[in-house]
Image (cartoon, helix red, strand yellow):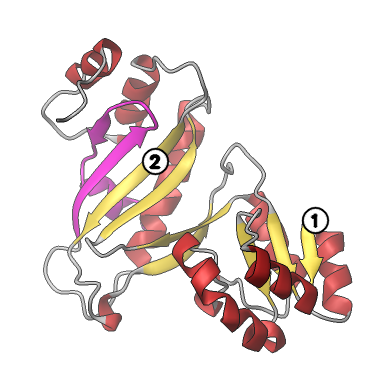
Amino acid sequence: MAKKASKNMTKSRAAVESRNYLLPEAVGLLQKVKFAKFDETVDLTMRLGVDTRHADQMVRGTVVLPHGLGKTKTVAVIASGDRLKEAEAAGADFVGGEDLVERIQKEGWTAFDALIATPDMMKSVGRLGKVLGPRGLMPNPKTGTVTQDVAAAVKEIKAGKVEFRADKTALVHVPVGKLSFSPEKLVENATSVLASVMRAKPSAAKGKYVKGITLSSTMGPGVPIDGAVADASIK
C-alpha cells in the first residue's frame, strides 16, 4: 500500500500548475513551498530520447557548476611518486597507492565522494570494480578522473565539478545546489548543466533529444521546465 503524502507535501504539489515553467519561475516556486527543516538539495532531471542499451547513444560527461553544490566534496587519489604530493597539496582528503587499493578492496571502504587515479595505477584500481562500480565511484578518463594532472582534477571537483550520466531509462539526474542558494545561483548552475547535457548529445541519437525537464528539491514537488531553456542554454 502506497504511503499517503503529508499535508505539507500535498499542499506543495498543489501549488504546481499544469504547465511548463521557466527556470527562474521554477526556482521561485520551490523556495516558496519549502517546508522541510533542513537545507534541501535541488535536482535537475532530464528525460532524453536516447537508447542507452547502445553504446553510441550513451550520454555522459562532467560540468563544473559556477556556484558549486553548497558543500565540499571528499576526494581520494590513488597515485604514485610525486603525484601523491601534488594531490595532497591540491587539497585531496585521502592519498595513497597500493595501500589505498587494498583498503578499498578488503574493507569496502568508500568514505569519499570522488576517486581520482593516475593511468599507471588503473591496473590495480580495475580490481575495485565490484566495490566502486555500483556507487558510481570508478575513475574514468571520460570524466577526467583518470589523469596525470591529479592536482587540476582535485581542484575542479572541490570547486563543484559534477558528473552526469543517462541511466537505463534515459534519465539524467544532476544536483544543482541547495535551496538556500539565491535564485540567480540556482538558475546559473542549472543552465550550465543543461548546456553540458545538450553538448553531449550523441550523433547516433535520432528524433527529439530532450523529452522532458524537471526541477525538484529533496522534499518538494517536481516542477516541469519549458524545454526551450535547453536549446537556449547553449547559445
Q: Is residue 144 above or below residue 114?
A: below
Image quarter in which the N terminus is found: top left
Q: Which of the two residues, 17 or 118, is positioned nearer the viewer here?
A: 118
Left or right relative to 208: residue 197: right
The location of residue 187, given as percent across then percent down, is 42, 37
Q: Is residue 46 magenta?
A: no
Q: Going 36% across and 66% down the picture, which residue do you hit?
A: 199
Q: In the image shown, does 23 or 147 lie closer to the viewer?
A: 147
Question: Which quadrant of the view contains residue 147?
Answer: bottom right
What is the quadrant of residue 10 in the picture? top left
Q: Which residues are magenta?
A: 210-235
The amino acid pointed to by label 1 is Gly
Mark number, residue 43: 2
Residue pointed to by mark 1: 91
The spot of residue 65 in percent (x, y) is 54, 49
Residue 10 visible at all:
yes
Residue type at mark 2 is Asp
Residue 97 seen in the figure = no
